Image: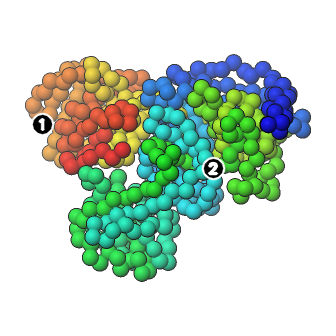
Amino acid sequence: MKARKNIVLLILCLSILWSLPAWAADQLAPGVKYWSFEKTNWEGKPIQGYVLEVDPGVKNTEIRPVMGNETIGQKEVLSKIAQRTGAIAAVNGGFFDVATGVPTGNLFIDGKPEYISDILRTSFAIDRGGAIKIGYLAPKMQVEVTGLGQLGVKGINIPAVSDGLVLYSSSWGKEIYAGTALVLKPSEGGYKAYPVSSGVKAPPGGYVLAGWGVASSQFSSVVAGTKVKVITEMPVDWKNLTHVLAAGPLLVESGLPVEQAVNEGLWGTLLKPAPRTALGVNAQGKVLLVVVDGRQESSAGLTLEELAYLMVDLGAVQAVGLDGGGSSEMWVKGKIVNSPSDKKERPLANGLMIIQQMPVYIDYQRLYLDVAPVLENGRTLVPMRKIFERLGADINWNADTKTVTATKGDVQIELTLGKSTAVVNGKTLKLDVPAKVVGDRTMVPMRFVGETLGAKVDYVTSNGPAVHIYSQAGGTAHD
């Protein structure tokens, strides 16, 4: 008890040392604030820091991990990820192999595992309501194939193995060459398996189950249409999560700084003052995304121990480190606001985006919109070009008549700004809401456009409001 009191007193002393006035907070959007600060580290050297405070309880607010070019192993600079996803603000994400772009540790997006390996570092997760969980996570993967029972899986989107099974999602981005493989296509309650030869990509929303060595012989009896379940074994307190990103080390637990760096495999020069990025959550449930510059005359950087105390000083009751060094970046209002130590943006394997709009998915893949969907008279309007292109339609814009024409196969749709009618293959149809301009984007009624082009449109509310569109009639939403 005495030791705990001493730690609390030390925190109070360090808070007094660091308590210089922060610049006025800038309200970026409902529930999203940004400010910067100037302090000194424990050696008395200056540091420059930047903070995003996000209230995940605000409607349609999302703290979302996004992969570089949406593909495992590819890298993309933070500003481009933020711009293409319609983000309000962004910071860099978790550690990754600079040479290969492969993340270090686990990654789940929309509840679906995108990368699972055997590296154990602190992860943070976001549940359906926006609450943050920070701790250690070691998920296990299995597939249950009708007639074969449950089969162990070595990982997801990892390189080929000499013997065993690996799952590949569409995020792998490359063809899979294995001894044998099953394409798993989404189906009600799970997936249906289709045996294939090597050289196949995972379908949207599905997987390829690839086998090497002795394991590859297990598929010989599988026939097309066999039912399959993909089972992710998670601890009870890690279930019903939306996103998970492995990071590390653990910095703050129960309101107190902790020293976990060496235990999580971080040592040597990684412990010296450097640029840092961290994620924390305060007692009110608000998320703190923090970047501190380093390796510069104007900002020397922090050790991981100093970063832990800084997060406590900022009000964090839980906190975890993210990737640092030349990766430490924050994007706000269309630009990088900090000074990266590389003197330029470093291409990243993933970043954390602050997005505030109703999610739209087409064929199980997120459709990022640079202008948020608009609700009008109970109907959702979305940017025309994004929706038409993803559904495979050709677009023509007539500036004189302010008419957009979309053509897909033998279907042609004409929408004129402000008109409450549309022309489909020469036939005039009434619209609930007309197309309109928001900002510099032409917005069109999503359900009318999708269904006219032969897609199925579902408005899903089970995990927060979202729209799912399936270009094929049999699509089903998977939470």
Where residue 149 is drawn, which disc sits there?
Answer: none
Amino acid marked by disc 2: Thr
| Image coordinates for residue 476, horizontal then vertical, percent | 26, 46
> Disc 1 and disc 2: Cα gap in Å?
56 Å
Q: Examine the image and state in which quarter residue 428 appears.
A: top left
Q: Is residue 389 visible?
A: no
Which quarter of the figure is the C terminus placed in? Answer: top left
Judge left or right: residue 414 versus residue 444.
left
Residue at screen point 40% across, 73% down? 211
Q: Is residue 248 above or below residue 396?
A: below
Secondary structure beneath label 1: loop
Label 2 CA crowd tier, 10 Å (few <14, some 14–19, many 20+): many
- State the residue in front, 268 or 222: 222
- State the residue in front, 120 or 415: 120
Judge left or right: residue 344 versus residue 116.
right
Judge left or right: residue 27 versus residue 472.
right
- State the residue in front, 356 or 220: 220
| Image coordinates for residue 249, horizontal then vertical, percent | 69, 48
Amino acid marked by disc 1: Asn
Secondary structure beneath label 2: strand
- Here the colouring is rainbow
Q: Examine the image and state in which quarter residue 170 appears.
A: bottom left
Residue at screen point 15% across, 30% down? 423
Q: Examine the image and state in which quarter residue 415 appears.
A: top left
Residue furthest front as drawn: 1
The residue beneath circle 2 is 122
Q: Earlier in the sequence, mark 1 or mark 2?
A: 2
The residue beneath circle 1 is 425
